[in-house]
């Protein structure tokens, strides 16, 4: 899936439904008291509802955290990711999306095919890896018979990997997707949670038309019933597996993905539950 095409598709739907699109107007600041966002062009916008869907480095989330109107998780959960684009050569790289474990501790690698190029990436939790991520990425690229890593343009960015919020909003301000840390802390998938949180937020806004400050309460209630438990169970499973030596958890993961690919696919798409980690989480907490 090409993200530009995908994002453009939904942008066109939003515009067709009546939304105004202001390109090249990145938000640089958010004033919670005034319910106002400021853009790089100096524009100021206010709204009855503020939707923070501005990514892993969300300025809306930062403003809420600074004002102490949301509680950041005590545990670390933002990973460092490295990514590059390589030309597609027939037979050299997988033709379907693939996830790889074993190259870095507390993380994973990926290979996503596009029509004319392949996206290769790797990510791991910051406190766990320090300077080992680049070495792991070089080893990963070499294992795929890809070009010399030194000749590739490697980009770095943050990735939600367990820094999800329990209450992703305050009054009329709602955080969605990566801005709320809503990526699967076990397999790293984020599109499903972005869509699901947007659905819950939209419902909360509709139900709070007359009382905007009630929107976050409605949104957080539905979020804690549906999305939050799944993220907790996924993180619990990750903590259990990744705390084991790599030569133990890697064969377990490989066997699970090989023997139950449909089960894993349905889990990260929300069609199945991570609640099968509930007992493990309870046992780990008791220990």
Image: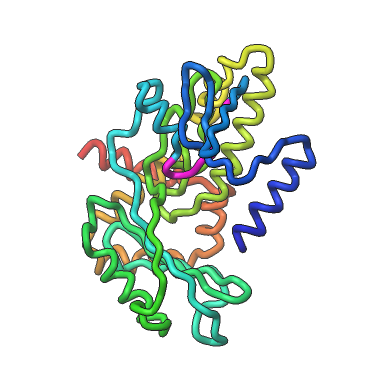
Residue drawn 63% across and 74% down? 115
Q: In this view, does 32 lie above or below 136?
A: above
Residue closest to the far front: 42
Circle count: 0
The one nearer the camera, 69 or 19, is 19
Can residue 265 be seen here? yes
**Relative to residue 175, is residue 132 drawn left or right?**
left
Q: Is residue 108 above or below residue 224?
A: below
Residue drawn 31% across and 68% down? 102
Residue drawn 55% across and 48% down? 272
- Provide residue 207's location: percent of width, then percent of height: 67, 20
Q: Quadrant of residue 254?
A: bottom left
The one nearer the camera, 45 or 111, is 45
The type of colouring in the image is rainbow
- Provide residue 94's location: percent of width, then percent of height: 52, 77
The one nearer the camera, 224 or 149, is 149
Q: Is residue 92 magenta?
A: no
- Provide residue 140's location: percent of width, then percent of height: 35, 74
Can residue 258 be seen here? no
Residue range (magenta)? 50-57
Q: Main secondary structure of the magenta part?
A: loop
Q: Does the magenta stretch include residue 56?
A: yes
Q: In which quarter of the image is residue 275?
A: top left
- Provide residue 99's location: percent of width, then percent of height: 45, 66
Give the position of the N terminus as an image quadrant: bottom right
The one nearer the camera, 169 or 100, is 169
Give the position of the C terminus as an image quadrant: top left
**Relative to residue 70, is residue 248 drawn left or right?**
left
Q: Quadrant of residue 108?
A: bottom left
């Amino acid at each position: 899936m090409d993200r530009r095409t995908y994002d453009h598709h939904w942008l066109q739907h939003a515009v067709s439904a009546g939304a105004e699109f202001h390109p090249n107007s990145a938000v640089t600041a958010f004033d919670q008291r005034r319910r106002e966002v400021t853009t790089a062009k100096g524009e100021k916008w206010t709204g009855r509802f503020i939707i923070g869907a501005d990514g892993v480095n969300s300025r809306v989330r930062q403003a809420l955290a600074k004002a102490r109107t949301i509680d950041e998780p005590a545990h670390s959960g933002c990973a460092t990711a490295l990514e590059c684009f390589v030309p597609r050569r027939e037979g050299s790289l997988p033709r379907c999306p693939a996830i790889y474990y074993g190259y870095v501790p507390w993380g994973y690698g990926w290979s996503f095919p596009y029509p004319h190029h392949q996206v290769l990436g790797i990510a791991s939790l910051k406190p766990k890896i320090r300077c080992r991520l680049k070495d792991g990425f070089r080893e990963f690229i070499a294992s795929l018979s890809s070009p010399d890593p030194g000749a590739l343009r490697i980009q770095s960015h943050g990735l939600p990997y367990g820094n999800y919020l329990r209450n992703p909003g305050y009054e009329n301000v709602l955080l969605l997707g990566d801005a709320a840390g809503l990526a699967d802390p076990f397999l790293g998938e984020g599109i499903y949670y972005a869509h699901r949180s947007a659905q819950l937020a939209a419902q909360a806004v509709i139900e709070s038309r007359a009382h905007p400050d009630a929107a976050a309460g409605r949104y957080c209630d539905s979020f804690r019933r549906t999305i939050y438990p799944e993220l907790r169970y996924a993180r619990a499973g990750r903590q259990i597996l990744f705390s084991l030596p790599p030569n133990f958890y890697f064969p377990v993961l490989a066997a699970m993905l090989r023997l139950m690919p449909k089960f894993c696919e349905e889990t990260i798409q929300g069609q199945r539950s991570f609640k099968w980690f509930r007992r493990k989480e309870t046992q780990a907490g008791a220990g």
